[in-house]
């Protein structure tokens, strides 16, 4: 099922989300949410989607396979990345400024500084620990989506914002 998007200025987009327990992750409600978020992300032409963007303030996000390096999953995998209760730490000093957009902020883009390399700890869709190094585009997307789960929208960090068509 395609889910409706929550957009600015909805106050819940600026509220920290609740962490999920393993039992909650395995519940039919959260498993259905995961199943629905992935096609919603693709239908809206996004590369990532956080649960608060579909009106559910839990620490869950999905990242599309286009942002994932080829060697991240086993060869020939067409899997998207599900992150539950994710956290990240920078692993290098380099910061890059990139253009970002967001499904919850239609018609705008902005320049945001993010760490070039991060270490991500999370749980997968079965509640199993997931720990990995991310660089480049995956690092950028992981930080953007994790920010959503902490009540931060990219426009809160952007140095410049402009309108797009």
Image (spheres, helix red, strand yellow):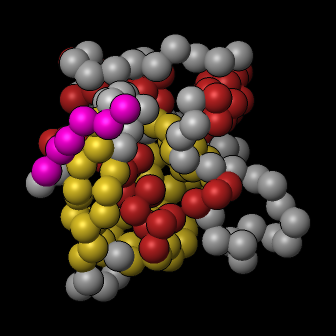
> Can see residue 67?
yes
The residue lying furthest to the right in this view is: 76
Q: Specify the quadrant that holds the C terminus.
A: top left
| Residue 158 relative to residue 86: left or right | left
Q: Residue at x 62, y 64 (%)?
A: 68
Reply above or below: 28 against 84: above
Q: Quadrant of residue 93?
A: bottom left
Q: Quadrant of residue 113?
A: bottom left
Q: Main secondary structure of the magenta part?
A: strand
Q: Residue 8 at x, y = what percent?
A: 26, 22
Q: Residue at x 82, y 70 (%)?
A: 74
Queried whether the magenta region covers residue 67, the answer comes back as no
In this view of the protein, which residue sits in the foreground, 66 or 52?
66
What span is colored magenta in the figure? 160-165
Reply above or below: 70 against 67: below
Q: Residue at x 70, y 16 (%)?
A: 1
Q: Residue at x 24, y 49 (%)?
A: 110
The residue lying furthest to the left in this view is: 159
Q: Residue 89 at x, y = what percent?
A: 32, 70
| Residue 55 relative to residue 99: left or right | right
Q: Quadrant of residue 18?
A: top left
């Amino acid at each position: 099922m395609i889910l409706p998007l929550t957009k600015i200025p909805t106050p819940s987009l600026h509220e920290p989300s609740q962490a999920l327990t393993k039992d909650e992750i395995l519940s039919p409600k959260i498993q259905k949410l995961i199943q629905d978020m992935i096609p919603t992300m693709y239908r809206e032409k996004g590369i990532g989607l956080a649960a608060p963007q579909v009106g559910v303030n839990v620490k869950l996000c999905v990242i599309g396979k286009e942002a994932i390096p080829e060697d991240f999953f086993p060869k020939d995998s067409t899997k998207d990345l599900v992150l539950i209760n994710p956290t990240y730490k920078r692993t290098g000093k380099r910061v890059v400024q990139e253009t970002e957009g967001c499904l919850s902020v239609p018609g705008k883009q902005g320049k945001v500084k993010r760490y070039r390399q991060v270490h991500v700890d999370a749980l997968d869709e079965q509640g199993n620990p997931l720990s990995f190094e991310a660089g480049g585009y995956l690092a950028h997307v992981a930080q953007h989506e994790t920010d959503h789960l902490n009540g931060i929208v990219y426009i809160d960090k952007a140095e410049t914002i402009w309108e797009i068509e």
